[in-house]
Image: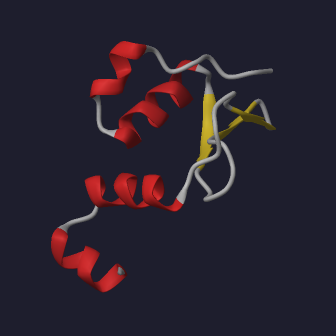
Amino acid sequence: MMPRAIEKDELAMAAIDQFLTAMLNNRGTDLHLNVGLPPTLRVDQQMASFNVSAIDEQQIIDVLREICPPNSWDTFR
């Protein structure tokens, strides 16, 4: 089962919101974001990858920076 594509109007949202919205729209329970792999959802106990390019290191950093408080980011980096 292939997850539903992320729609263009969803691109204005924060990156993590796009992934979480897609997860909910696909009845997913887990979201897996790993450098070098496309975003992947767990749907009905099975893993399903989005039909998009693999996530690179900068994309992961961008997603994390959006949700991480600045003082925690300094510790994380």
**Scheme of image coloration:** secondary structure
Residue at the farthest bottom position: 75
Task: Identify the image quadrant of residue 2.
Answer: top right
For residue 51, above or below residue 19: above
Image quarter (top left, top right, bottom left or bottom right) of the C terminus: bottom left
Q: Is residue 30 left or right of residue 57?
A: right
The quarter of the picture where the N terminus appears is: top right
Specify whether 56 is left or right of 65. Answer: right
Residue 55 in the image: state x and y as whole percent. 58, 49
Q: On the picture, is 31 further left or further right than 60?
A: right
**Front-lying residue, 46 or 3:** 3
Q: Residue at x 55, y 55 (%)?
A: 56
Can you tell which quarter of the image residue 49 is in? top right
For residue 7, above or below residue 63: above
Please determine whether, in this image, residue 60 is positioned above or below residue 20: below
**Position above or below: 13 against 63:** above
Q: Name the residue at 35% across, 25% down.
A: 11
Q: Position of residue 10 (x, y in %)?
A: 36, 21
Identify the residue at horizontal 44%, vertical 27% (top origin).
Answer: 21
Depth order, front residue of 31/77:
77
Looking at the rendered structure, the number of numbered marks drawn on it comes to: 0
Q: Is residue 13 left or right of residue 32?
A: left
- Percent of width and height locating residue 72: 25, 76
